[in-house]
Image (spheres, helix red, strand yellow):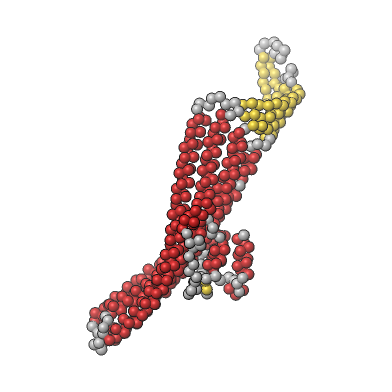
Amino acid sequence: MTRLLATLWLASIPFNLAFADDLMEIYQLAAQNDPEYKISDINQLAASEIKSQSIAQMLPNVGFTAGSARNRLNNAKTSFLGSGLQHYWDSSLAVNLTQPVFNWGHWVQLDQADNKIAQAEAQFQAKQQNLMTRTVEAYFNILAAQDNLEFIIAEKKSIEKQLEQAKQRFDVGIIAITDVYEAQAGFDRAKAAQIEAENLLDNSKEALREIIGDNPAHLKTLQPTIPLNAPVPEDISAWANTAESNNFSIVAQFNQAEYVRKTIDLQQSKHMPTVDIVAQYRQQDNGNQFGFRGDNESFGLQFNLPLYEGGGTVSRTRQAQYEYESAKEELTKVKRSVIREVKDAYRGMLSSIDQVKALDSTTKSAELAVEAAEAGFEVGTRTMVDVLAIQRNLYKAKSDYARSRYDYLINGVKLKQAAGSLSELDLLQINQYLQN
């Protein structure tokens, strides 16, 4: 499915952009290189072998034994074996067959194998969705860090220009030296902020490198306008119910709890009898003068009933019961955690929509405020402190606006992950909002 979607995605875009660093390409690299995801895939393959091992216990067990030994017999008394010192060889070979007829524990283990396989499959699906979320989050964290750095550099350039103007105005006696000092302080603050922003960008790139195994190059950016759609359905309880039924972490823990519950039956089965078909073919050659040389065959049923094992089976049964209670509590814990996550993401998505709209208006208002403050400074009704503060508000509003758009997309992905419905189609949809 992953390869098919990737092929369709590549075929749908122009040839000259087929190798651009967009979200889908980064995700494909993540799927190929992320150790956490690959570990889960390998664990799933390992778990699939449990079923074969459980079936093998019910099939015939055939073994072959052979041996030869040199014997020294010193018979001090006269008997039919003779007397005195004798040396001779004993040799034998045997083929043994055992076919379980009734062993309730084997059937319990076969049932448990289904739970282990289902658990591993759910864990793999959970890791796959987690990889999508981590990739989206790391991708947009880089874009947010780039935006933040861009706005800080723009602010620094603006302050630098005002610093030069302030120095010129001071030289001709239009403004006081305090305005120059304020502009210089603002410029120094902007330089420090730039250093911090550059470090944040490097850290964001390193977080993505950890996932894809390589340093990310230039990434496509988000279009100026994207649709801001509320979750469908717009009902937080419906999303919570869906998550409780479909979330893969819950499914995995449910199967783990079932596996532990069946361990109680497995321990109790050790009180029950077992019945096996047993057969043997044996050849023997006793090399002394009255030894046996020949073969024999045997076939029959073997019945085994445990009577007393020192209380070990009873103790292991109690242990399994306690472990089942623990597994049920762990399932409750996972469910509550998932419900919290889905509600947080739902509210976060709605909040992001409101924030995008509000910060868009804030940015436009801040731009007008900067123009007014600069005009006021020209005529002496505003100080340099006022201008710098209003400019700082403008660039912060721009940075917050950009961040809110990324948060909207990230919360949407987290919501679907918590609900268990996140797929590559959702990433393809987001990918359409990117541009060079």
Residue sticking out furthest to the bottom: 172
- Nearer to the camera, 200 or 424: 424
Q: Position of residue 77 (x, y in %)?
A: 67, 11
Q: Residue at x 60, y 28 (%)?
A: 273
In this picture, residue 262 sits left or right of residue 187: right
In this picture, residue 300 sits left or right of residue 155: right
Q: Is residue 286 above or below residue 194?
A: above
Residue sticking out furthest to the top: 78
In this picture, residue 347 sits left or right of residue 94: left
Q: Quadrant of the N terminus?
A: bottom right
Q: Is residue 219 above or below residue 339?
A: below
Residue 255 occupies quadrant: top right
Q: Position of residue 375 (x, y in %)?
A: 31, 84
Q: Position of residue 145 (x, y in %)?
A: 43, 69
Residue 423 occupies quadrant: bottom right
Q: Is residue 119 something that shows in the picture?
A: yes
Q: How many marks?
A: 0
Q: Position of residue 2 (x, y in %)?
A: 60, 60
Q: Residue at x 53, y 53 (%)?
A: 246
Q: Residue at x 55, y 48 (%)?
A: 119
Q: Residue at x 26, y 80 (%)?
A: 383
